[in-house]
Amino acid sequence: MWWIYALLSAVFAALTAIFAKVGIKGINSDLATAIRTVVILLIAWGIVFARGSAKELPSLSRENIIFLVLSGLATGLSWIFYFKALSLADASKVAPIDKLSVAFVIILAAVFLKEILTIKTAIGAGLIIAGSLVLIF
């Protein structure tokens, strides 16, 4: 079942690039990011309250909070740089390079989370890196 969610994530990420490229036309990319963030904030909290997950807030540990804040900071910076790149280049060039994050996750997960790096996964990461280099140069 997880792969269905991952596939849906990929579809919506693709739509994000297309909608964002059209939406940032003629405006500052930081303003575009801020507008997008407000929409996401409303949707996320709406889901939390609709599903009754807000009751779990008091049970968050210090570690949960620290790493979720760090993740939020990383996400915010990613979006800011992504929208800036979209304002300067074609979506068909920016989005695939942004997907280098997949290769970075594979490497960082092996180093910091001690996840097993199989030969198949390493080859896949290498191909993603190679494809991104082809697009850049």
Image: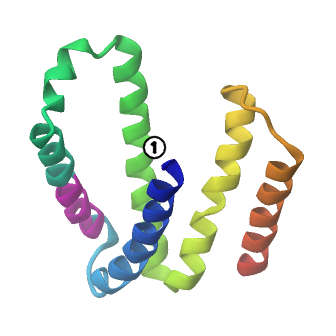
* Residue ranking furthest to the front: 1
Residue 27 in view? yes
Assign a secondary structure to mark 1: helix
Please name whichever residue, 59 or 21, is drawn nearer the observer in this view of the structure: 59
Please name whichever residue, 50 or 89, is drawn nearer the observer in this view of the structure: 50
Q: Position of residue 80 (x, y in %)?
A: 40, 59
Q: Position of residue 52 (x, y in %)?
A: 13, 32
Please name whichever residue, 80 or 75, is drawn nearer the observer in this view of the structure: 75
Q: Residue at x 24, y 56 (%)?
A: 37
- The residue that label 1 is drawn on is 74
Q: Residue at x 49, y 72 (%)?
A: 85
Q: Main secondary structure of the magenta part?
A: helix
| 33 shown above or below 28 | above
Which three-letter amino acid code belongs to the residue tagged 1? Answer: Ala
Q: Position of residue 132 (x, y in %)?
A: 72, 71
Disc 1 crowd rating (10 Å Cα; few below 14, some 14-19, many 20+) is: few
Quadrant housing residue 60: top left
Relative to 110, is 24 on the left or the right? Answer: left
Residue 89 in view? no
* Residue ranking furthest to the right: 119
Relative to 107, is 9 on the left or the right? Answer: left
Tag count in the figure? 1
Q: Position of residue 110 (x, y in %)?
A: 74, 34
Which quadrant would the C terminus be assigned to in this image?
Answer: bottom right
- Give the magenta range: 31-40
